[in-house]
Amino acid sequence: MTDFSRQEAAARAGIDQETLDHLVELKIVQPGEGDRFREGAVRKLALVGSLLAGGIPAAALAAKIRAGDFDLNFLDSPSFDTFTALSGRTFEEVASERGIPIEVLLAIRESVGAAVARPGDHVSEVELEIVPSIEAQLASGFPPDTVERLVRILGDSLRRYVLAGAEAFRSHIIGPVANASGEEIGAAAEAASERMSGPIEHAIVGMYRAQLRHAYTSNIVDGITSELAASGIVESNERPPAMCFLDITGFTRLTSERGDKAAADLADVLGRLVTRVSVEHGGRPVKWLGDGVMFHFREPGPGVVAALTMADEVPRAGLPPAHVGLHAGPVVFQDGDYYGTTVNLASRIADYARPGEVLVSRAVVDATSDPQVEFTALGQIELKGAAGPIELYAARRRSS
């Protein structure tokens, strides 16, 4: 097992040696044989260093540890390797060694929600694990600004899952033993972390591969069909994609009135509902927008059916009625989001719709041939922010 001198341990934990000596004196952290510090001790030093930086007095922390209220020995477990130490190299040194623009490397730390790093700061060991992917993307021809955006998107996408998992850990692992001794709390944390950390890491990789397979398949199919259409072998697909906005008036106010737990439950119910329905009809939620959701559908027809289904099911789930708008046309996809006139008009149409109503543009009607759906013309409508009047239609299920 690797161990370190006082100077090495302090550097890896991101504290000065004087602070380390003080923590040893208070018996918060203890060296092993030969005054050497193992990985677990370095993790404790790094965590305590963060507590000290946050204004917690070392003496008060030591008193709590002596009283048995706190226990840091759980950090000796390899399952807490996420508390990795700082490496011996700075961001600017790694950038120079690997030929990576410094701005791209600095984005690693910022993408996880930490304080913005400076070129002279030391890179942590876990941050170094991200560097080979950056090198591979640059070597494959990705421009540096694209790689930097991908780093930030990766961090943003995983943050929601990690924060939700951390809250679940606090509620369901630590919560039941919150009144126990520090040693018992530490033992519960260690046991749960050892059980879950490996499988969760494998799940994240598995989810990435599943998403990659889906995206690659979509690219391959689009490429083949475009080539066949260009050769005249099959007809070109003239159905443009559709953007859809579903709004629930007062959803934010409703969730705030019912309290945090009820708000989370309502948001979860809505999220499950709209995700299931949209995916079943060839779409997906793109982002949440306060009182609503934005969707992308590969084709307008299935998008209309999905919108009608969601409008029916939202009130049954105990939520206020939804009003929905769809528009079809070209969109620009960048950084996981959609942009352009099609998106803006779909949003304006949703704003105009009344509770329980699904309104669509003429472009959606022209691209929809589903026998389940019928449209009623509303005429030319002036929409706020639109360049001119828009021909709108109310969509509904065709009566049997």
Image: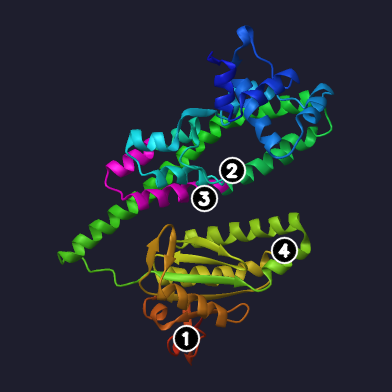
The answer to whether the residue labelled 1 contacts the one labelled 2, judged by CB atoms less than 8 Å apart, is: no
Q: Is residue 151 above or below residue 285?
A: above
Q: Earlier in the sequence, mark 3 or mark 1?
A: 3
Quadrant of the rendered image containing residue 51: top right
Depth check, mark 3 against mark 1: the one in front is 3
43 or 12: nearer the eye?
12
The answer to whether the residue labelled 2 contacts the one labelled 4, judged by CB atoms less than 8 Å apart, is: no
- Which image quarter holds the N terminus? top right
In three-dimensional space, the C-alpha distance between marks 2 and 4, rounded to whole angstroms, equals: 23 Å
365 or 162: nearer the eye?
162
- The disc placed on residue 162 is 2
Label 3 packing within 10 angstroms: few (<14), some (14-19), many (20+): some
Label 4 packing within 10 angstroms: few (<14), some (14-19), many (20+): some
| Residue 281: x %, y % from top left | 46, 63
Name the element at disc 3: helix
- Residue position for label 3: 156
x 63%, y 46%: residue: 164
Q: Which amino acid is tagged 2? A: Val
Residue numbers of the magenta segment = 132-159
Depth check, mark 3 against mark 2: the one in front is 3
Depth check, mark 3 against mark 4: the one in front is 3
In three-dimensional space, the C-alpha distance between marks 1 and 4, rounded to whole angstroms, equals: 32 Å
Q: Earlier in the sequence, mark 3 or mark 4?
A: 3
Name the element at disc 4: helix
In this orientation, does residue 398 appear? no
Q: Which amino acid is tagged 1? A: Leu
- The disc placed on residue 392 is 1
Q: Which amino acid is tagged 3? A: Asp
In three-dimensional space, the C-alpha distance between marks 3 and 1, rounded to whole angstroms, equals: 37 Å
